[in-house]
Image (tube, rainbow, N blue to C red):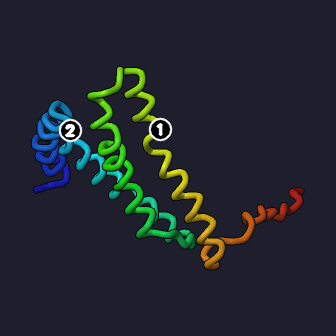
């Protein structure tokens, strides 16, 4: 099977499946979003490592997958007891724990020597005079 046929076959199965998952929502949608977040973060860390960046790979991938799960777990019980505006605010504020976790990781990474104490200085590129 050539590349084009493989793409068409994948889309023929994947698009209706994605539509059903999105339509039904709930935990299956959250799990798909968590999987996509995990895969995207893995790809980002792969690209970063090729350029020499030492990332906290396992922790970053775990946090990326946990954001949709924790947001869903926190906001699902609140949906029944809050009005729509309060529910929206709760769903926006729920992932703030990730910001705190990232701050802790950056601080801990600096203490462990995995991150530089200060941001890297920009390097100047020497220009050669043109004649």
Q: Position of residue 95 (x, y in %)?
A: 45, 45
Give x and y (percent) for residue 52.
Answer: 56, 73
Q: What residue appears at the point 61 percent right and 78 percent down from the top-left corner? A: 112
Residue 82: image quadrant is top left
Could you say which is closer to the camera, residue 51 or residue 126?
51
Residue 111 in the image: above or below residue 75: below
As drawn, the label of residue 93 is 1
Q: Is residue 23 left or right of residue 124?
A: left
> Percent position (x, y) of residue 4?
18, 48
Q: Which residue is mark 2?
A: 26
The mark that comes first in sequence, 2 or 1, is 2
**Vertical comparison of 39 with 18: above or below:** below
Residue 41 sits in quarter? bottom left
Bin the neighbour count of mark 1 within 10 Å (Cα to Cα): few under 14, some 14-19, many 20 and up.
few
Closest to the camera, between mark 2 and mark 1, is 1
Secondary-structure class at tag 2: helix
For the residue pair 90 and 5, the one nearer the viewer reads as 90
Could you tell me which residue is drawn at 28 percent across and 37 percent down?
Answer: 76
């Amino acid at each position: 099977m050539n590349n084009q046929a493989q793409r068409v076959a994948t889309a023929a199965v994947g698009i209706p499946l994605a539509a059903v998952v999105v339509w039904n929502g709930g935990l299956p949608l959250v799990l798909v979003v968590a999987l996509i977040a995990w895969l995207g973060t893995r790809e980002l860390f792969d690209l970063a490592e090729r350029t020499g960046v030492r990332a906290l790979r396992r922790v970053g991938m775990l946090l990326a997958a946990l954001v949709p799960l924790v947001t869903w777990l926190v906001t699902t019980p609140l949906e029944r007891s809050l009005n729509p505006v309060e529910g929206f605010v709760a769903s926006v504020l729920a992932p703030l724990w990730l910001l705190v976790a990232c701050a802790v990781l950056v601080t801990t990474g600096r203490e462990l020597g995995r991150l530089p104490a200060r941001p890297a200085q920009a390097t100047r590129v020497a220009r050669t005079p043109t004649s």
